[in-house]
Image: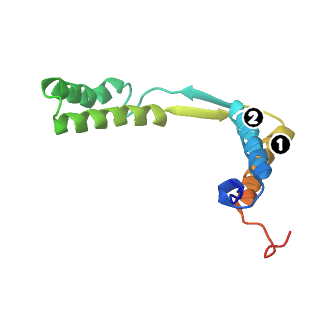
Amino acid sequence: MAGMEIKGAGGTPGGLWMFFGGLAMVVVGGYLLLNQVEVHSGFWSWWGGQTFGLTLVPLLVGIGFLFFDGKSLVGWIVTGAGALIIVAGILANLRIYFQPTSLYNTLLMLALIAGGLGLIARSLRRSGAGQSQ
């Protein structure tokens, strides 16, 4: 134990407190920013109006293949593709809005995130005689 040197963030002699301080700033800023976001879903509209049922077909066919033969590569591929189509459709039909807030609050949220990322990056950098402070 006597020969072991305590390293900072990222194995560098940088400041461990700086890393955790920056991480706390990013977490608080991210929370405040995401708290201002409102998410709504829209109508499913792939290949025309109200087509959610059509996107279930590949998933159901793949599940049928898997019930017939659980080791079927085609069944796993079709089931996976069907699941990806459904997830992509859900994501494509989300509407994301930023709730009205003051300019001060917006700048505070963004400054916390940017400053926290700067502190994290600074803590990972090797400090010493070769670097100016």
| Residue under numbered circle 2 | 32
Q: What's under tag 1, amino acid-wise?
A: Leu
- Whether residue 95 is visible, yes or no, is yes
Of the two numbered discs 2 and 1 on the same chain, state the one appearing first in sequence.
2
Using the image, tell me which numbered label, if any, was put on residue 108: 1
Numbered marks: total: 2
- Whether residue 47 is visible, yes or no, is no
Quadrant including the C terminus = bottom right
Kindly identify the residue that appears in the image at 72 percent across and 53 percent down: 120
Query: How would you rate the neighbour count of disc 2 (Cα within 10 Å): few for under 14, some for 14-19, many for 20 or more?
Result: some
**How is colour applied across the structure in the image?**
rainbow
Kindly identify the residue that appears in the image at 16 percent across and 35 percent down: 72
Residue 68 vs residue 44: left or right? left
Q: Which quadrant would residue 28 be assigned to in this image?
A: top right
Using the image, tell me which numbered label, if any, was put on residue 1: none
Residue at far left of view? 68
Residue 118: where, in percent of width, then height? Answer: 75, 56
Kindly identify the residue that appears in the image at 84 percent across and 36 percent down: 102
Q: What's under tag 2, amino acid-wise?
A: Leu
Residue 117: where, in percent of width, then height? Answer: 72, 52
Kindly identify the residue that appears in the image at 22 percent across and 30 percent down: 62
Above or below, 67 against 119 in this view is above
CA gap, disc 2 to disc 1? 9 Å
User: Residues at badges 2 and 1 in contact (C-beta under 8 Å)?
Assistant: yes
